[in-house]
Amino acid sequence: MKISTLMVCLIGAGLMGMVSAQKPGFTRVALQSHELSVPGRMGVQARAEFDPGIFAGRHTHPGEELGYVLEGEFELRVDGQPTRVVKAGEAFMVPANTVHDALNIGSSKGKILATYFVEKGQPVATFVN
Protein backbone atom coordinates (compact mmCIF):
# COMPACT_ATOMS: atom_id res chain seq x y z
CA MET A 1 0.00 0.00 0.00
CA LYS A 2 2.87 2.39 0.83
CA ILE A 3 4.44 1.77 -2.59
CA SER A 4 1.11 2.52 -4.31
CA THR A 5 0.73 5.76 -2.35
CA LEU A 6 4.31 6.75 -3.18
CA MET A 7 3.69 6.11 -6.89
CA VAL A 8 0.56 8.28 -6.85
CA CYS A 9 2.54 11.07 -5.13
CA LEU A 10 5.38 10.80 -7.67
CA ILE A 11 2.98 10.79 -10.63
CA GLY A 12 1.13 13.75 -9.11
CA ALA A 13 4.38 15.62 -8.58
CA GLY A 14 5.30 15.00 -12.22
CA LEU A 15 1.93 16.31 -13.38
CA MET A 16 2.27 19.37 -11.17
CA GLY A 17 5.69 20.07 -12.68
CA MET A 18 4.21 19.89 -16.17
CA VAL A 19 1.51 22.37 -15.18
CA SER A 20 4.05 24.91 -13.96
CA ALA A 21 5.67 25.75 -17.33
CA GLN A 22 6.16 29.53 -17.43
CA LYS A 23 6.30 32.22 -20.09
CA PRO A 24 6.77 35.97 -19.62
CA GLY A 25 3.64 37.57 -18.14
CA PHE A 26 1.96 34.20 -17.47
CA THR A 27 2.39 32.06 -14.37
CA ARG A 28 0.75 28.76 -13.48
CA VAL A 29 0.94 27.95 -9.76
CA ALA A 30 0.42 24.26 -8.93
CA LEU A 31 -1.99 23.81 -6.01
CA GLN A 32 -2.75 20.08 -5.78
CA SER A 33 -2.82 16.78 -7.65
CA HIS A 34 -4.69 13.59 -6.67
CA GLU A 35 -5.56 10.25 -8.17
CA LEU A 36 -9.33 10.09 -8.78
CA SER A 37 -11.81 7.27 -8.14
CA VAL A 38 -12.03 6.84 -11.93
CA PRO A 39 -9.22 4.42 -12.90
CA GLY A 40 -6.40 6.06 -14.85
CA ARG A 41 -7.50 9.66 -14.10
CA MET A 42 -5.91 12.44 -12.07
CA GLY A 43 -7.38 15.67 -10.75
CA VAL A 44 -4.94 18.57 -10.99
CA GLN A 45 -5.64 22.09 -9.76
CA ALA A 46 -3.67 25.24 -10.53
CA ARG A 47 -3.99 29.02 -10.37
CA ALA A 48 -3.11 30.81 -13.62
CA GLU A 49 -2.05 34.46 -13.42
CA PHE A 50 -1.90 36.68 -16.52
CA ASP A 51 -0.49 40.19 -16.87
CA PRO A 52 -2.68 42.57 -18.92
CA GLY A 53 -2.60 41.79 -22.65
CA ILE A 54 -1.03 38.34 -22.17
CA PHE A 55 -2.25 35.09 -23.77
CA ALA A 56 -1.81 31.69 -22.11
CA GLY A 57 -0.86 30.23 -25.52
CA ARG A 58 -2.89 27.81 -27.66
CA HIS A 59 -2.92 24.41 -25.98
CA THR A 60 -4.90 21.25 -25.19
CA HIS A 61 -5.42 19.03 -22.13
CA PRO A 62 -5.86 15.22 -22.13
CA GLY A 63 -9.10 15.69 -20.21
CA GLU A 64 -11.64 18.33 -19.27
CA GLU A 65 -10.77 21.70 -17.76
CA LEU A 66 -13.15 23.44 -15.36
CA GLY A 67 -12.17 27.09 -14.88
CA TYR A 68 -13.29 29.85 -12.53
CA VAL A 69 -12.20 33.48 -12.92
CA LEU A 70 -10.92 34.72 -9.57
CA GLU A 71 -9.89 38.20 -10.72
CA GLY A 72 -10.07 40.13 -13.97
CA GLU A 73 -11.61 39.70 -17.39
CA PHE A 74 -10.55 37.26 -20.10
CA GLU A 75 -11.33 36.54 -23.72
CA LEU A 76 -11.75 32.77 -23.94
CA ARG A 77 -11.05 31.25 -27.36
CA VAL A 78 -12.09 27.60 -27.73
CA ASP A 79 -11.83 26.03 -31.19
CA GLY A 80 -15.29 25.27 -32.58
CA GLN A 81 -17.02 27.72 -30.21
CA PRO A 82 -17.65 31.46 -30.44
CA THR A 83 -15.11 33.61 -28.57
CA ARG A 84 -16.55 34.76 -25.26
CA VAL A 85 -15.63 37.05 -22.40
CA VAL A 86 -15.47 35.62 -18.86
CA LYS A 87 -15.18 37.87 -15.80
CA ALA A 88 -14.45 37.48 -12.10
CA GLY A 89 -17.05 35.18 -10.54
CA GLU A 90 -17.81 33.33 -13.79
CA ALA A 91 -17.02 29.71 -14.64
CA PHE A 92 -16.25 27.93 -17.91
CA MET A 93 -15.52 24.44 -19.23
CA VAL A 94 -13.14 23.32 -21.99
CA PRO A 95 -13.74 19.84 -23.47
CA ALA A 96 -10.91 17.29 -23.51
CA ASN A 97 -8.33 17.55 -26.30
CA THR A 98 -9.78 20.85 -27.56
CA VAL A 99 -7.42 23.63 -28.64
CA HIS A 100 -8.05 26.79 -26.64
CA ASP A 101 -6.46 30.00 -25.35
CA ALA A 102 -7.24 32.85 -22.99
CA LEU A 103 -6.26 36.52 -23.17
CA ASN A 104 -6.30 38.92 -20.23
CA ILE A 105 -8.30 41.85 -21.64
CA GLY A 106 -8.39 43.69 -18.30
CA SER A 107 -6.11 46.48 -17.10
CA SER A 108 -4.63 44.55 -14.15
CA LYS A 109 -3.34 41.06 -13.38
CA GLY A 110 -6.04 38.42 -13.92
CA LYS A 111 -6.31 35.09 -12.13
CA ILE A 112 -8.08 31.85 -13.03
CA LEU A 113 -8.52 28.75 -10.87
CA ALA A 114 -8.24 25.75 -13.21
CA THR A 115 -9.12 22.16 -12.37
CA TYR A 116 -8.08 19.48 -14.85
CA PHE A 117 -9.41 15.90 -14.99
CA VAL A 118 -6.69 14.25 -17.05
CA GLU A 119 -5.28 10.89 -18.05
CA LYS A 120 -2.64 9.69 -15.62
CA GLY A 121 0.84 9.73 -17.16
CA GLN A 122 -0.02 12.36 -19.79
CA PRO A 123 1.21 15.96 -19.73
CA VAL A 124 -1.43 18.27 -18.26
CA ALA A 125 -1.03 20.73 -21.15
CA THR A 126 0.39 20.43 -24.67
CA PHE A 127 1.04 23.64 -26.60
CA VAL A 128 0.09 23.83 -30.29
CA ASN A 129 0.82 26.33 -33.08
Image (cartoon, rainbow, N blue to C red):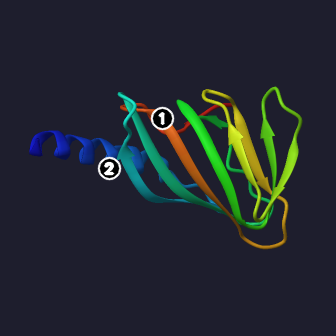
Res. 45 in view: yes
**Image point (77%, 65%), residue name:** 88
SS category of the residue bearing label 1 = strand
Q: Say which of marks 1 and 2 sits in front.
A: 1
Side of 119 relative to 128 (left or right): left
Which residue is outermost to the front? 37
**Image point (36%, 47%), residue name:** 34
Instruction: State which quarter of the image contains the N terminus.
Output: top left
Q: Amino acid at mark 1?
A: Val
116 is higher (above) or lower (below) than 91? above
Q: How many numbered tags mark residues here?
A: 2
Q: Position of residue 50 (x, y in %)?
A: 69, 62
Rendered image quadrant of residue 26: bottom right
Asked whether 116 or 54 is in front, the reply is: 116
Instruction: Pick whichever of labels 1 and 2 is earlier in the sequence.
Output: 2
Q: Which residue is mark 1?
A: 118
SS category of the residue bearing label 2 = helix
Q: Amino acid at mark 2?
A: Ala
Res. 27 in view: no
Side of 53 relative to 97 (left or right): right
Rendered image quadrant of residue 5: top left
Asked whether 20 or 66 is in front, the reply is: 66
Instruction: State which quarter of the image contains the C terminus.
Output: top right
Q: Position of residue 6 (x, y in %)?
A: 17, 46
Q: Position of residue 11 (x, y in %)?
A: 30, 41
**Image point (26%, 48%), residue name:** 9
**Image point (84%, 71%), residue name:** 107
Q: Position of residue 126 (x, y in %)?
A: 55, 34
Q: Which residue is mark 2?
A: 13
Side of 29 relative to 105 (left or right): left
Asked whether 84 or 50 is in front, the reply is: 84
